[in-house]
Amino acid sequence: MLELRPTCEHCNKTLPPDSLDARICSYECTFCMACVERVLGNVCPNCGGGFVPRPVRPSTNWKGDNFLGKDSASTKVKHRPVDPATHTQFSAKIKTISQEKR
Ligand SMILES: [Zn+2]
Ligand SMILES: [Zn+2]
C-alpha cells in the first residue's frame, strides 16, 4: 500500500492525500510537480528513476473499507532537500534516457 507521504521531500510543501500535485517514483520518494520539473528534471535524486502522478486514495468507503478513513496517509515528514549542484551532476546522464529505459 502506498504510504501517501505528507510533504515534498525537497521544498517541504504540504501534499495532502487528495493532492493532484504529488509525484512519486517507484520507491515512493515524493515530490511536488514543480520540484520534479524545475529542480529534478524528472530524475529521482535517490534512485535515478522517473516520476508519475500519485493516485488519490478515495475518501469515501465505496467498497470493502478500502478508503482513507481506514488506511490513512502517512504523517512522517521526509525533508531531504536536494543540493542543486550535486543533482545536476548526478542527473546529467540519466535525464537523457527516457524513464522506461533507465
Ligand atoms: Zn517541492
Ligand atoms: Zn526514487
Image: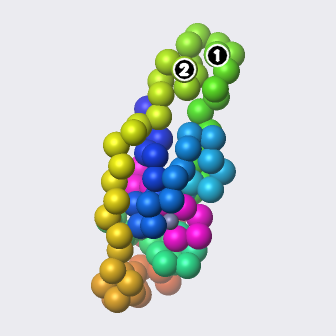
Q: Where does residue 47 sit, x and y in percent of width and height?
A: 33, 64
Mark 1–mark 2 CB contact (< 8 Å):
yes
Farthest residue to the top: give it: 64
Disc number lying in front (1 or 2): 2
How many numbered circles are shown?
Answer: 2
Residue 29 counted in the magenta span = yes
Q: Which residue is mark 1?
A: 61
| Three-letter amino acid code at the position of disc 2 | Gly
Residue 51 visible somewhere in the drawing: no
- Figure quadrant of residue 90: bottom left
**x, y (%) of residue 57?**
59, 33
Looking at the image, residue 49 sits to the left or right of residue 53; the answer is: left
- Position of residue 48 in the picture relative to residue 101 (left or right): left
Judge: label 1 CB < 8 Å from ligand 1.
no
Is residue 69 at all visible to an observer of this figure?
yes
Q: Residue at x 43, y 32 (%)?
A: 1
Q: Residues within 10 Å of mark 2 (few under 14, many from 20)?
A: few
Towards the viewer: 91 or 58: 58
Residue displayed at 41% across by 37% down: 74
The percent position of residue 52, horizontal first and vertical second, equals 57, 57
**Which element carries disc 2, helix, strand or loop?**
loop
Identify the residue at horizontal 47%, vertical 41% (top origin): 4
- Residue 41 is covered by the magenta coloring: no
Residue under label 2, please give it.
Answer: 69
* Label 1 SS: loop
Q: Which mark, residue 49?
A: none
Give the camera-side residue of 44 and 33: 33
Amino acid type assigned to the residue bearing label 1 in the image = Asn
Q: Which residues are magenta?
A: 27-35
Placement of 76 over or under 61, stated as above or below:
below
Query: Which quarter of the picture shows residue 10?
Result: bottom left
- State the CA–CA distance, disc 1 to disc 2: 8 Å
